Image (spheres, rainbow, N blue to C red):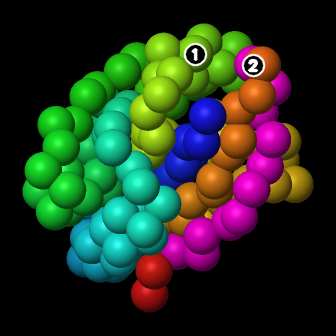
Amino acid sequence: MRAVLVRHGRAGRRKEWTGVDRLRPLDERGRRQAAGLVGPLKALGVDRLVSSPYVRCVQTLDPAAASLGLDLEQRDELAEGASASDVRSLLRNFDGATPALCTHGDVVEELLGERLALKKGAARVLEVVDGEVRLGEEIPPPA
């Protein structure tokens, strides 16, 4: 099975946000990054969109949902602080689909390792074989 792991787009500085962090939205650059992900996700044949319930993650996949005509699922297994085993368990639910999963930097590092961390707005193709996650192409963040 193929999946696309997406780190949410830029959402400004956490320290400058005075509200609840789950509600911190994408900034202007983050919105451009989200729009720029539509083409690569379409080209990869993404047919399911799954996001952390944090606003910035949902907003990162919103343009793809609109363009591809797909519903956007929100799952706590992708929320900040989720473990690699949470994500692997979630991946087992998508047999036969090609999902894009939008999550946070800490979850990406937990799953891929610190040296393979993604920049905000970037994505990584994953091949999941017998529960093992193999790394594919990295998609750099759109400008």
Q: Can residue 64 be found in the magenta stretch?
A: no
The quarter of the displayed image where residue 64 is located: bottom left
Q: Which residues are magenta?
A: 131-141
Residue at the spot 57% in from the left edge and 15% down from the top edge: 92
The residue under label 1 is 92
Residue at the spot 67% in from the left edge and 45% down from the top edge: 126
Residue 85 sits above or below residue 72 on the image: above
Residue 17 sits above or below residue 49 on the image: below
Instruction: Please say whether residue 85 is visible from this viewpoint.
Output: yes
Residue 109 sits above or below residue 119 on the image: above
The alpha-carbon separation of the residues under discs 2 and 1 comes to 7 Å
Badge 1: residue crowd in 10 Å (few <14, some 14–19, many ≥20): few
The residue under label 2 is 131
Amino acid beneath label 2 = Gly
Residue 122 is left or right of residue 66, and the answer is right
Residue 135 is left or right of residue 122, and the answer is right
Between 97 and 104, the one nearer to me in the picture: 97
* Residue 42, x across and y down, in percent: 35, 64
Badge 2: residue crowd in 10 Å (few <14, some 14–19, many ≥20): few
Q: Can residue 140 be found in the magenta stretch?
A: yes
Residue at the spot 33% in from the left edge and 38% down from the top edge: 48
* Residue 91, x across and y down, in percent: 56, 23
Amino acid beneath label 1 = Arg
Looking at the rendered structure, the secondary structure element under dot 2 is loop
Question: What residue occupies the far bottom of the structure in this picture?
Answer: 143
For the N terminus, give its image quadrant: top right
Tell me, yes or no, whether the two marked residues, 2 and 1, touch with CB atoms within 8 Å.
Answer: yes
Instruction: Please say whether residue 25 is visible from this viewpoint.
Output: no
